[in-house]
Amino acid sequence: MKKAVIITARTQSNRFPGKILKRISGKKRSIDILIERSKKIGHPIILATSTSKEDDKLCKHVKKYRDIKIFRGNKKNKIRRWQLCFKKYNIKIASMIDGDDLCFDYNLYKNNMFTKSILCCPGNIITGIFTNVLSSGTINKLSKNLKRDIDTEMIEPLIKKKNIKKKIIKINKIYLNKKIRLTFDYKEDYILLKKIFKKFSTSEKTENIVKYLLKNKNLNEINYFREHDWKKNQQLKTKNTYLNL
């Protein structure tokens, strides 16, 4: 396959254990929502998870209820996991979906499936809207000479170290500089996501979800204060990655 959608997810989570299999809407779990939204992009979907025993349950659920491919690789070194996934399925370019981002904008991915490097979003975008689009060439550059078990959850240090040029995609202004948080790391995020998907279908356009939250700002008070904690955690992880390169 030349193009694909890769959902990166594992069962283990320090801040909210097992969140990828948490029920969000009726019987639908986080992973189910990610897969349903990924289908809107229009390319084959692959779950990229680890070979750890703790992820057996996730793979079992996906095999039973969802007709997508599963790739299992290194637990810590997700870049190496991605590289082997790209190689196995002969992928040239992929939409990279983070397992935390249940409200990601599938149209942003669908309209930006082209790059020889890496497509990223501006820093002032609502957290959880878009991660990146990667080419096979960029994956190979990122993976070259990496220690096998290095933690590469944060890829920004490697992008900088290897001088990989990024392209920032054009974003609807409705997604910029808003006090809205649409990712899943904490209990408060879980509460908001359940409210969102009680109001909307799991495949609702992200733009409509954001418009609803802008009109009902009291809902954002449920979890937006967690954005500070999330950013602090991201900064710490990034710093640790720099130290281990």
Image (cartoon, rainbow, N blue to C red):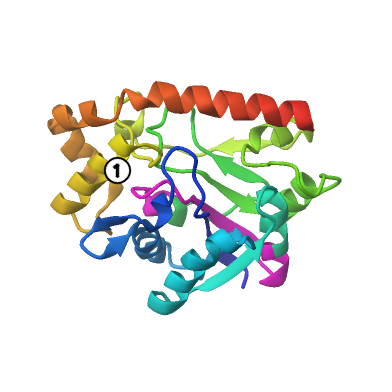
The image shows residue 222, relative to residue 192, as above or below, that is above
Q: Nearer the viewer, residue 214 or 110?
A: 214
Q: Position of residue 25 (x, y in %)?
A: 23, 58
Part of the protein shown in magenta: 85-108
Above or below — where is 78 with respect to 88? Answer: above
Mark 1 packing: few (<14 Cα in 10 Å), some, or many (20+)? many
Taking 179 as reference, is 99 above or below it?
below
Provide the secondary structure element on which disc 1 rests: helix
Q: Give the residue type that dot 1 points to.
A: Tyr
Residue annotated with mark 1: 190
In this rendering, position of residue 243 left or right of residue 204: right
Q: Is residue 142 left or right of residue 130?
A: right
The percent coordinates of residue 141 (x first, y second) are 78, 47
Q: Residue at x 62, y 37 (%)?
A: 154
Q: Is residue 116 visible?
A: no
The residue drawn where x is 52% and y is 27% is 233
Quadrant in the rendering for residue 170? top left
Image mark count: 1
Viewer-nearest residue: 62 or 98:
62
x, y percent for residue 16: 41, 42
Residue positioned 76% across, 47% down in the render? 149
* Quadrant including the N terminus: bottom right
The answer to whether residue 58 shows anywhere in this view is yes
Image side of residue 193 versus residue 101, left or right: left
Q: Residue farthest to the right?
A: 145
Q: Position of residue 217 (x, y in %)?
A: 16, 28
Give the quarter of the figure containing the C terminus. top right
The answer to if 87 sits in the magenta stretch is: yes
